[in-house]
Image (cartoon, rainbow, N blue to C red):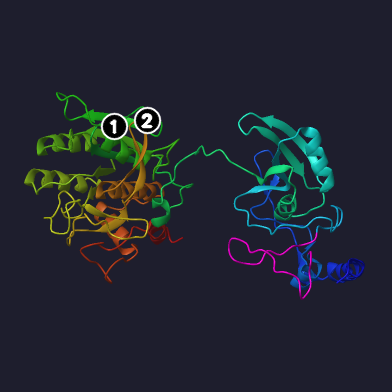
Amino acid sequence: MNRPLTRILTGILLTAFAGCPVFAQTTPDPQAAPDGTRVETQPAGRHVVYLPQMLAELFGPGAGRDAPAQPATPGGEPTPTLPTPAGAGAFSLPVAPQRAISGAFVPDEVLVTLDGDEGVAAAVAAQFGLELRSARASTLLGRTVARLGIPDGRPVGFVLAQLAGDGRLADRVPNHVFQLQQAAGVVNYAFERIALDAGAASGENVSVAVIDTALDGNHPALKGRVAGTFDALPDMEVADRDHGTSISGLIAGGETFRGIAPGVRLLHARAFESGVSSTNVLLAALDWAVEEGAQIVNMSFVGPENPLFSAACNNAMARGVVLVAAAGNNGPGAPFGYPAAYEDVIAVTATDVHDRLMGQANRGRYIDLSAPGVNVVAPIPGGMDVVTGTSFAAAIVSGAIANLMHAGEDAAPEALAELLRTTAVDLGAPGRDEEFGDGLLNAKAAMAERTGN
């Protein structure tokens, strides 16, 4: 087809299709960059008209039934050649195919690099109907970096495709937006899985005691949050603070890490070193916790049944103290773990983000509840880490109970344990089983059951 006729048809067809809604794409709602600049996550135009394939074929260079085939793109598709829109040297330059742009970017500008100076950048901008917004020499890139504005609403992807045909330019890219990744606070998936609103989590004025290793009281998540400490191993040098820091942090953490009950009055008893303790030491720690007014005692440890410790646990519960214990990490064939297996102690096993049981978890009819305990983020001395074990699942249950008590739940320990069991989300085989107990802790349902909301 000859060029004069092509130009005539161009004007007719563009006029006909310009108002057709089939080919109009409105601009998606923009986001905001940190400096207030509008950004979009995908190319957008203000009623930009995309030519149908008929026009692309009609107006491409050498178009026609007998024209040679266009080169293929890396994906094997023929490379269409689209006209340049009016206002930017209409139909004077071919347009390379657009490519998908990932990530957020400034919607009305692009970045290019070139070997010339600001004058060359200005000439490129003028030729393509763009605005030169800035240009500077980059030492690292060894070229001039120019920021070109798009004043007429053309999509970024389309402008990049236009610029691809200019040999003066070395690089043509979107002006992607980056964000600082400093976290104001870490929120575990545990909140979602147990149906507890992280923003509303409190536990204020509820006393929770943790019997564990020593903790890092200077950790930002725990600094100023420990109401009292007790050392049941006064003659042994402190070497281990990891486990205790994680357990107490999961319950009461604040600032850089949000615990399940950040408002609690935290009592912390050191009773373990190198992962080991004894009945005598544990008795001393439990005595101290009860004497200090603990309403909940978290016991993330396992051992054999002991009559003295059993009696101490029973007497604590008789005083209204809720005892929460880890079910154990010794595998399906392990014997019952105590104190979790004592009557009315809430025995907690660990699940992952998909509510699957931790492989090394103990099994048995004494298991009461499941809670997140696989790959949960927790404080450790000097920072944060991902931790796994029924120990950490128990801490999450202790924190959830503190929230219930804060909301006015003052039932006896056995009644509170029953409430948690009956409102749990059933997992595994229907009904109570030896893997998940009564199911996944559901803090929201437990709250609603007691308050009627």
Asked whether the viewer can see residue 206, the reply is no
Crowdedness near tag 2: few (<14), some (14–19) or many (≥20) residues, C-alpha within 10 Å? some
Q: Tell me residue 277's x, y (percent).
A: 14, 37
Q: Nearer the viewer, residue 5 or 262?
A: 5
User: What span is colored magenta in the figure?
Assistant: 61-83
Residue where numbered disc 2 is placed: 219
Q: Is residue 393 magenta?
A: no
Q: Residue at x 89, y 70 (%)?
A: 9
Q: As drawn, which residue projects farthest toward the bottom?
A: 65
Q: Point out residue 176 in the picture as x, y percentages from the top left corner.
A: 63, 45
Residue extending furthest toward the left: 307
Q: Are marks 1 and 2 in contact (CB under 8 Å)?
A: yes
Amino acid on which disc 1 is placed: Leu
Quarter of the view holding residue 443: bottom left
* x then y, percent, for residue 310: 12, 47
- Name the mark on residue 43: none
> What secondary structure is found at the residue carrying circle 2?
loop
Q: Secondary structure at mark 1?
A: loop
Q: Dot 1, how many residues are within 10 Å of its Cα: few (below 14), some (14-19), or many (20+)?
A: many
Residue underneath mark 1: 215
